Amino acid sequence: KFGTPIRTDIKTMPEYMKQLGYYTAHVGKFHHTPRNRFPYDYIHGREQQAVGFLAGYDRKKPLFLVVCSHPPHTPWIENTSYDPSKITLPPNFVDTPETRADRADYYSDVTLMDSILGDVLDAVARKGMSENTLFVYTTDQGANWPFAKWCVYDGGLRVPLIVRWPGIVAPGTEAAAMASLADLLPTFVEAAGGKPP
């Protein structure tokens, strides 16, 4: 069931990272329950606050920052950049003016998300932290389209996983290994010098 509280015997990501000496922050969408089981030091509901948070971060502790953007989740913003008539639709889509308009709105929301992400990475760079930052971009499911979100088709199960880690992961590297979001916690714990559970 969506929104089911976490089991009481499960240790959460911020609990692990705090034990490893990290300042923990979560900015943006927050669906975890109960909230007290996710004891981030800083929580703010708007993803755009990540830039301001980073600007003021004092760097006395290493930082574990989670930024959860709303875009490109529905409802999408209204299209301002894309010509619906020139969009290439996936082959399983019904080609209608409404589908094209929705796809253009979706692309506009993806562009907004990309801009937010760029602002966060720029803020990391301004703090001089780029070269010592493990950055991971992923999502929890596919987009809200037929045969995607809420479905066990590739469009719902296959999600992006992009990693930038200077000196550890070579730029442009692609891996064929199957990964799961469940791999993130032990990876982060090990990267922070801890022993994965």
Image: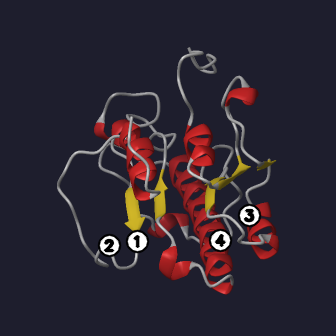
Q: Nearer the viewer, mark 1 or mark 3?
A: 1
Q: Position of residue 155 (x, y in %)?
A: 35, 42
Q: Which mark is residue 120?
A: 4
Disc 4 secondary structure class? helix
- Which of the pair 147/126 is nearer the observer? 126
* Residue type indicated by callout 1: Trp
Q: Are marks 1 and 2 in contact (CB under 8 Å)?
A: yes
Q: Earlier in the sequence, mark 4 or mark 2?
A: 4
Disc 1, SS: loop
Under mark 3, the amino acid is Ala
Residue under pointer 2: 168
x and y percent of residue 84 in the render? 53, 64
Q: Is residue 35 left or right of residue 129?
A: right
Asked which secondary structure carries label 3, the reply is helix
Residue at (47% x, 57% y) in the render: 192
* Identity, as a three-letter code, of the amino acid under mark 4: Val
In whole angstroms, how far apart are the C-alphas of marks 2 and 3? 25 Å
Q: Tell me the tag on residue 139.
A: none
Looking at the rendered structure, which numbered label has been put on residue 50?
3
Q: Position of residue 187 (x, y in %)?
A: 38, 50
Instruction: Compare marks 1 and 3 and give the one earlier in the sequence.
Output: 3
How many angstroms separate mark 1 from mark 2 (CA)?
6 Å
Label 3–label 4 contact, CB within 8 A: yes
Seen in the picture, residue 8 relative to 196 is either above or below; the reply is above
Q: Earlier in the sequence, mark 2 or mark 3?
A: 3
Left or right: residue 170 versus residue 100 is left
